């Protein structure tokens, strides 16, 4: 295959590193899972890439496109493994982080744990300067202040500069950066006017702090990662997946590493949206369960829900306001500590708990035989018969079924007076209910109903737990795509090269200076196009523009689309009508006579998506005949039963079978619940439909 050209995607997760190799037309040629090498994640990624290429007789030099996603940014923030950071704010505003939103996220919790904003108060510094909300200089920056800052910065690795109203005029931030670099050229400096040029000082400062905190680690990692692949023969550019569902260059990712947070899960949401589009599904719940976490995302009309803000490291798992707010473009999803490596235990009140702590890949579940001592979800699945030793992980290591069962019986069964099967079933049901509960809560917050949705399940453990989570969440239809075990990495290959910019410029819509706003938007478009061009060259792309509007005095905005051209005075009326329609859709009715104000303006430049795949020819339904079975604990009755045992590669479009059944493939297993029927569609998706068991 010396004249072939490949595309390669690698997703470095908390437990496994997933690799997908395709031809240039997008046909999957090889996939694999390797254990994540936490000492240097690039080692596991390179090993997986070489394995995939070796399997088809290819080399890295033949790779024409390479996309990478990683959990390193997320984990560094959650595990507090970043740089020593100081903040520099306008004099009089030292305590922005301490004051936060001026409220407690749980009013009556006397033992409330405050969110950790990564910067100690003695590292919160100030400088004399002041900008107005319109960007006018009220107090010039005092350049002599640098000498007073230097002693406090001696032990500091990175600085987050967030001066008042710098989103309107960043001159003082840029001036301060140059002054600091003159005396500390090795210092990493993040400017809020570049990282998150939006109003709301606390959110902007938090975002800039998070960026500065992980920038030394991520920039070093990306340099090392690229060097390793270049030394092995890679010639094409490496693109990075972002939290917003697009790809960007290594250079941009190194400057704005905060945009890499949740990049892996974003790939999964892109995959689910693509499948929904190709299958003609209007309402979808994406369910991605890996070794460490589970991610759920609502997708409507083949578009994932998007957000401008999310929280990192919540002190209380599901309570808004208990984490560190970050304002970047991000695919809206809920993530919980429920994966194959999630640790099960009995607490001091005699309650069975699962997660969020995880055994990860080092040492991993007990069944892996790599030194793990804590009972995990994977150990429960092995004991229940859902994971088969003879097909697991393509034979990379042996599964120790006996020791997994003994650990569950000792750690869980003993305190609760249960045998190993009952203990394993309890662990499985607890983690499944936790994921279903998170899905229901997410749907309620979004004002939607799960009952009408199709669940698209993927990830190393998603297909294994999908039927049980769907049953608990009230979902009756599940779709498992081809190569689900490496779903997020597959999604990387569908993502556009994209970059989004949001800037604040306050105005009343009725009196907006459309010429000045057009000039600002054109400048933003040029910046976004330059970033996309680095990764996509001359590929076709399109620009979208939008404004975030609200009634005057309100606290939150609604995104309204703008025409991709110069704004004119005649646009004010149709934009007013568009806002009132959107407001009525969300809050039942508009408010007559209220002025509309615009706080933020956004542009997104992205390469054009490929056309929808043509559905495969419909096949006549037929029963799939198999005599091979395996004993499992029934997911409905709790009794031992013989489940059909099927290799997915033996299934063809039109094949049908009823659960309970295990459909095995190289990186995962689909458990067909006892109350579900399976049919293979023309695209070789597994469609699981719940039947009435009454």
Image (cartoon, rainbow, N blue to C red):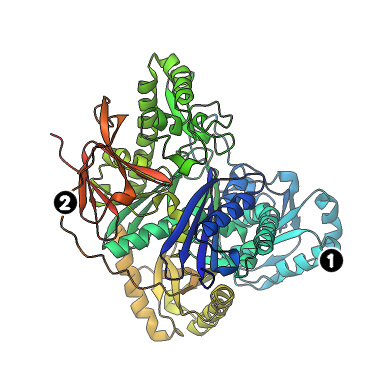
Quarter containing the C terminus: top left
Judging by the rendered image, the residue that carries numbered circle 1 is 182
Q: Quadrant of residue 431?
A: top left
SS for dot 1: helix
In the picture of the structure, the residue carrying the numbered disc 2 is: 622
Q: Nearer the viewer, residue 310 or 615?
A: 615
In the image, is residue 403 above or below residue 99? above
Tag 2 secondary structure:
strand
Q: Position of residue 187 (x, y in %)?
A: 78, 58
Question: Which residue is pictured at 64% across the width and 43% down the height?
Answer: 80
Give the mark nearest the N terminus, 1 or 2.
1
Image location (x, y in percent) of residue 436:
34, 40
- Callout 1 environment at 10 Å: few (<14), some (14 to 19), or many (20+)? few
Residue 531 seen anywhere in this rendered image of the structure:
yes
Q: Which residue is drawn at the image coordinates 69% and 46% (left, top)?
A: 119
**Residue toward you, 653 or 476:** 653
Q: Residue at x 48, y 82 (%)?
A: 514
Name the residue: 80% across, 63% down.
Answer: 180
């Amino acid at each position: 295959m010396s004249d072939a050209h490949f595309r390669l995607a690698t997703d470095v997760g908390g437990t496994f590193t997933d690799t997908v190799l395709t031809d240039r037309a997008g046909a999957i040629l090889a996939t694999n899972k390797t254990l994540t090498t936490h000492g240097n994640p690039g080692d596991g990624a390179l090993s997986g890439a070489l394995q995939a290429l070796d399997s088809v007789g290819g080399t890295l030099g033949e790779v024409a496109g390479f996309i990478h996603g990683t959990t390193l940014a997320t984990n560094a923030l959650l595990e507090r493994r970043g740089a020593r950071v100081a903040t520099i704010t306008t004099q009089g505003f030292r305590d922005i982080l301490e004051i936060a939103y001026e409220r407690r996220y749980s009013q009556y919790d006397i033992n409330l744990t405050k969110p950790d904003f990564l910067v100690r108060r003695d590292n919160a510094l100030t400088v004399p300067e002041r900008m107005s909300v319109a960007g006018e200089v009220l107090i010039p920056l005092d350049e002599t202040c640098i000498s007073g800052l230097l002693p406090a910065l001696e032990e500091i690795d990175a600085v987050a500069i967030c001066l008042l109203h710098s989103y309107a005029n960043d001159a003082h931030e840029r001036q301060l950066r140059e002054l600091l670099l003159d005396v500390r050229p090795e210092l990493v400096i993040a400017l809020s006017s570049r990282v998150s040029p939006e109003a709301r000082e606390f959110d902007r400062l938090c975002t800039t702090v998070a960026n500065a905190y992980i920038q030394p680690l991520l920039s070093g990692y990306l340099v090392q990662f690229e060097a390793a692949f270049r030394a092995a023969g890679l010639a094409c550019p490496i693109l990075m997946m972002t939290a917003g569902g697009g790809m960007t260059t290594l250079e941009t990712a190194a400057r704005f590493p905060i945009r890499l947070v949740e990049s892996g899960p974003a790939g999964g949401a892109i995959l689910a949206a693509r499948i929904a589009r190709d299958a003609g599904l209007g309402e979808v719940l994406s369910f991605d369960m890996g070794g460490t976490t589970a991610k759920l995302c609502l997708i409507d009309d083949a578009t994932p829900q998007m957000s401008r803000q999310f929280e990192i490291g919540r002190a209380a798992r599901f309570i808004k306001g208990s984490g560190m707010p970050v304002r970047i473009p991000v695919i809206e999803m809920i993530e919980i500590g429920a994966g194959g490596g999630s640790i099960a235990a009995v607490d001091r009140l005699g309650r069975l708990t699962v997660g969020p702590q995880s055994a990860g890949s080092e040492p991993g579940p007990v069944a892996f035989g790599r030194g793990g001592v804590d009972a995990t979800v994977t150990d429960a699945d092995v004991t229940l018969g859902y994971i088969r030793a003879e097909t697991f992980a393509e034979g990379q290591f042996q599964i120790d079924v006996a020791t997994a069962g003994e650990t569950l019986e000792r750690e869980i069964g003993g305190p609760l007076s249960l045998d190993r099967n009952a203990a394993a079933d309890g662990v499985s049901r607890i983690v499944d209910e936790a994921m279903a509960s998170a899905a229901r809560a997410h749907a309620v917050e979004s004002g939607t109903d799960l009952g009408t949705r199709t669940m698209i399940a993927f990830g190393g453990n998603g297909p294994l737990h999908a039927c049980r989570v769907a049953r608990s969440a009230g979902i009756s239809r599940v779709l498992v795509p081809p190569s689900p075990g490496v779903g997020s990495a597959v999604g990387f290959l569908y993502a556009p090269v994209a970059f989004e910019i949001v800037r604040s410029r306050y105005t009343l819509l009725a009196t907006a200076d459309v010429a000045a706003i057009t000039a600002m938007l054109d400048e933003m478009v040029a910046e976004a196009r330059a970033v996309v061009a680095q990764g996509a060259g001359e590929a076709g792309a399109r620009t979208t523009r939008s404004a975030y509007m609200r009634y005057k005095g309100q606290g939150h905005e609604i995104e309204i689309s703008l025409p991709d051209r110069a704004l004119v005075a005649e646009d004010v009326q149709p934009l007013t009508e568009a806002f009132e329609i959107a407001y009525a859709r969300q809050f039942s009715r508009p408010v007559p006579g209220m002025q509309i104000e615009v706080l933020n303006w956004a542009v997104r430049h992205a390469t054009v998506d490929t056309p929808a795949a043509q559905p495969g020819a419909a096949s006549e339904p037929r029963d799939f005949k198999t005599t091979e079975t395996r004993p499992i604990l029934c997911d409905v009755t709790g009794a031992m039963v013989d489940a059909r045992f099927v290799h997915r590669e033996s299934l063809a479009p039109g094949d049908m079978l009823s659960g309970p059944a295990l459909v095995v493939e190289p990186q995962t297993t689909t458990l067909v619940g006892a109350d579900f029927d399976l049919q293979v569609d023309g695209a070789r998706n597994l469609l699981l439909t719940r039947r009435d068991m009454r």
